[in-house]
Image (tube, rainbow, N blue to C red):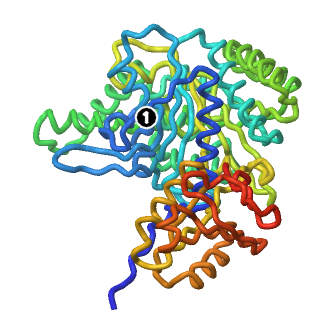
Amino acid sequence: MKKRVERLRGMYDLLPETHWKQRWLADRLHQLLTQAGYAAVDTPILEQGDLFQTSFGQELWQNLYAFRLHQRDLCLRPEYTASICRLYLDHCQQQPLPLRFQYAGPIFRYEAPGRYRYRQHTQVGVELLGGQAAAADAEILFLACDILNELHIPNFRLELGHIGVASGFIQRLQLDDHAARLLLSLMEQISRSDEGEQAARARLEALYPLDAQGSGGAEAQEAHARNILSLLSGISISFGDEAARAEIVERFLWKAGRAEQRRQILYALEFLRALHSLSGPPPAVFDQIRELLDRYKLEAAPLVELEQLVQAVKECGVQDEQIALNLALGRGVSYYTGMVFEIHARDEDGFDAQLCGGGRYDRLVRAVGGARDVNACGFAFGLERLLSLIPESALPRAASLQALVIPVSEQDIPYALNVARKMRTMRVYTEVDVTGRGVSAGLRLAAKRQMTLALIVGEDERRAGTITVRQLNTGRSGVVSFDDPGQLFDDPGQSIDMKEYYL
């Protein structure tokens, strides 16, 4: 017996009721975003792999569905932002800024599956290109919070940060590009938990082990070179040629440089821990963070931006206790340049779910091939998680079949199909019985499917241009004209007003 082919782990099937709800939610979000001026666009699910290198880098590339086909490096779309930037460069560079785009579609990431976390899931979001940074940031934050209120999810938690504080500190350390990018990409892991910080530290220490001592400065490097050359000159060992001797010196200096990088990286980790420890609600946390920035002699401009954003979202009805400032928030991708945020909520079982995330990425357009930087910001909702938090009372009733047309014989099928088409034009959900088992079996099928009406058609109905209607919940029946099935029956005791079944 052939082994059954099973669904891939981390993927999911959409059954009718859930499919209906997700479609309704996507349409509702589309309506709300359209009203805010965001035009709907879409991009291919499959893109060139280089497009996402800037977003995810080497560390996270293993989590993407990337592959090589016909000598081309390809990738299933892991997020929309880079694709929207490519769309802008391909089609919209001549249009005046700002431009507002909305999108909805599947994305793919090979991550550990969990509750409402799938390897394929649906993102619905916006990108705002152009505009003054503070105003645009306030707009998208306000919009994200307003949508949650519209969907009857008011008890959410907004986690708000600014990548500029950590990136400014890291740039000042003069780390190599790899170390700097790695630290920023691990910020999310560091800010999540003690275990996350320990994992990030272990990762960094594995890359920068304690295997040498020294300084990475230019003068120190020259001094190390002179010392090692002097030492080698006094050793009676043949190195073959001067190139071999130079290689030994270079390796030593490389190790010494890595030792300095390690020291600076551990210093940066201490700063990120201190930054994360000050997470909390405004306004008190602002004073504490300002003291930390003064201590490290860092600019307070990002903090001023966040104070303005907090005031903006409070206008949307968000309370101080719903806001948590977290300047160690990293979001897991490397293109952010300013404000970043996440929105979380707890479901009825107390499970914490991230519903939304986004931020500012002013250098991504250039990174994917643009000639200049473009101010840009955006956010995305996870549709599956969002749906799990909407109260059942706020969801619409799923559409259900209301009528079954039952042909008496095989010769009556064409007329039955015409009757079904007529009912559908009147917006009555109608299905045709194709079992061929006769009227009694058809009536039992309609009752089992909890339909309201059985429309029986046979030779007599075909000739007369009528439909025999049976109301299954009351047992009443009668005959109506094919041309006017909404008419009332002549006998008031037997009449059925078909209009009550119209949608």
- Given residues 307 and 375, the one toward you in this image is 375
Where does the N terminus fall, quadrant-wise?
bottom left
Q: Residue at x 56, y 39 (%)?
A: 124
Residue 18, how many percent across, how many down? 62, 58
Q: Residue at x 76, y 46 (%)?
A: 345
Q: Residue at x 63, y 36 (%)?
A: 29
Q: Picture quarter containing residue 479?
A: bottom right
Task: Check disc 1 and report the residue beneath it.
Answer: 42
Question: Could you tell me how many numbered marks the image carries?
Answer: 1
Q: Residue furthest bottom?
A: 1
Crowd tier of the residue under label 1, counting other residues whose Cα lies within 10 Å: few below 14, some 14–19, many 20 or above: some
Secondary element at image label 1: loop
Residue 351 in view: yes
Q: Residue at x 44, y 24 (%)?
A: 364
Residue 469, how many percent across, how many down? 64, 67
Residue 281, how many percent across, how many down? 84, 31
Residue 41 vs 138, above or below: the answer is below
- In the rendered structure, the answer to whether residue 475 lies left or right of residue 63 reads right
Residue 446 vs 190, above or below: the answer is below
Residue 171 in view: no
- In the rendered structure, the answer to whether residue 428 lies left or right of residue 94 reads right
Q: Residue furthest left?
A: 240
- Given residues 307 and 462, the one toward you in this image is 462
Residue 315 vs 188, above or below: the answer is above
Residue 106, how many percent across, how many down? 47, 47
Question: Which amino acid, by three-letter code, is at mark 1?
Answer: Asp
Q: Picture quarter containing residue 161?
A: top right
- Given residues 347 and 282, the one toward you in this image is 347
